[in-house]
Amino acid sequence: MTTEPWVSVEQVAQHLGVAKDTVYRWREHRGLPAHRVGCLWKFKLSEVDDWVRAGGADESIREADESK
């Protein structure tokens, strides 16, 4: 059994094809799952993928929530 590695902001950004600033913004405002390790943010790609599949990165959902 292998353990899923923790990855950096840069690796998440590359995995999703977005800028690092977007990853930080999603973590702060949209609930992107992340874990603080010292002064760094670390991620599990499986958690990130689950978050995306659940609509966490969907901008239309964000816009609908803001209009309420």
Image (tube, rainbow, N blue to C red):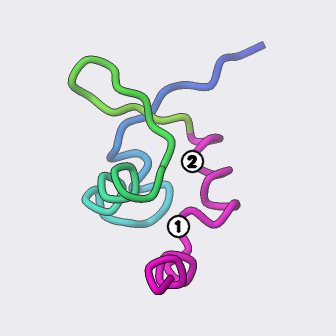
Q: Secondary structure at mark 1?
A: loop
Q: Is residue 32 left or right of residue 51?
A: left
Q: Disc 2, disc 1: CB below 8 Å?
A: no
User: Mark 2 or mark 1, which has the lower sequence index?
Assistant: 2
Callout 1: 10 Å neighbours few (<14), some, many (20+)?
some
Residue in view at x 49 percent, y 55 percent: 15
The residue carrying pointer 2 sits among few (fewer than 14), some (14 to 19) or many (20 or more) residues within 10 Å by Cα, namely some
* Percent position of residue 11, x then y: 40, 45
Q: Nearer the viewer, residue 66 or 40?
A: 66
Is 51 on the left or on the right of 59, as rendered? right
Q: Quadrant of the N terminus?
A: top right
Image side of residue 14 versus residue 64, left or right:
left
Q: Which mark is residue 57?
A: 1
Q: Quadrant of residue 52?
A: bottom right
Query: Callout 2, which amino acid?
Result: Val
Tell me, for residue 48, which label it has, or none: 2
On screen, residue 44 above or below 56: above
Please state the extent of the stretch shown in magenta in the rendering. Answer: 45-68
Q: Position of residue 25 (x, y in %)?
A: 31, 58
Q: Report the predominant secondary structure element of the magenta stretch.
A: helix
Farthest-out residue, front: 68
64 part of magenta stretch: yes
